[in-house]
Image: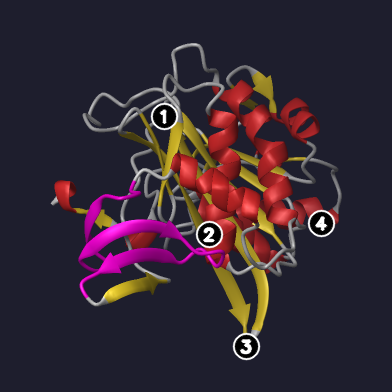
Amino acid sequence: MCAAEPSGATGGRANAHDDAASSAARNTDASGDVVDVPMRTFDGVSVERLRSELHVPELHLFASTASTLDVAHRLGASGAPHGALVLADHQTAGRGRGGKSWSSPPGTGLWITILARPVTTVPPVMTVRLGLAAAGVLDLFALAPVQVKWPNDLYAGGRKLGGVLVEARWRGTSLEWVAVGIGINVTVPGHAARGGALGAHAGRASVLRALMPPLRAAIDRTEPVLDAGEIADYDVRDLARDRACVEPMHGIVRGITAGAELIIAARGGMVTAHAGSLTLSEDV
């Protein structure tokens, strides 16, 4: 296991809070060895410059980590501020919805988590809102229009490009913070035959710079439901619209509600699903 200095993990002011946040960002195994490996540059851009360009209060940059979501939750527990960003070149245990693993090898994509608090929007609405915000930016870099698949997947050219995962942490009935995890394939990993990617012209730092402003804006919105413009955008991008599905139930997909629920025309009539994953018949 590699040991690392705390200052390598965080770009920001050198004060007591930064030291505490850097300590919280590090993960250790049972022997106390540091298993997260921080780094000081991302595709040739220094952590200090990147933090300034992205206008984030803290940037925790890792060559390798188990999961940027886990780092963000540790930062949340230690009092890190709203907007703190965790970015990794490589995740050894990246995760998606339902505990599924997300392939995130070095140099191939963007694996980020943004810490958000306070939060007034429920995670399902935030997930769809963030997916739409990301899709609008990724259209500029992808080789085909970016589509969304309920509740959290991004596709281009029929191949999965990325995903959004929003994890909340509560204290009783109070929502303390939300960790917004986003994974984007910039290049296709050699073993991911069904995975999609952005065009060869897309640089990771450039994509990240373009993504952060709309993602922050989506996180900071306080409307508890999707507005008419978001619903219209979703309808245009909906990968599953009018296609048969077997999960979360058998039927035909008819879009989503303003509350980010999936609408399915089932045998007994129109029904909505607020949780679960969408599996299309042709995927089975």
Q: Is residue 219 visible?
A: yes
The answer to the question of whether label 1 and label 3 lie on touching residues, with beta carbons closer than 8 A, is no
Dot 2 corresponds to which residue?
Answer: 166
Marked residue nearer the N-terminal end (1 or 3): 1
Mark seen at residue 17: 4
Q: Residue at x 51, y 47 (%)?
A: 234
Q: Which residues are magenta?
A: 240-267
Q: Residue 172, labelled with which disc?
A: 3
The 10 Å Cα crowd at callout 1, few under 14, some 14 to 19, many 20 or more, is some
Q: Which amino acid does the dot numbered 1 rest on? A: Pro
Q: Residue at horizontal 73%, vertical 47%? A: 217
For label 4, the SS is: helix
Tag in front: 4 or 3: 3
Give the amino acid at mark 3: Gly
Find out whether residue 259 is within the magenta segment. yes
Q: Residue furthest bottom?
A: 172
Q: Position of residue 14 (x, y in %)?
A: 84, 44
Corner quadrant of residue 155:
top left
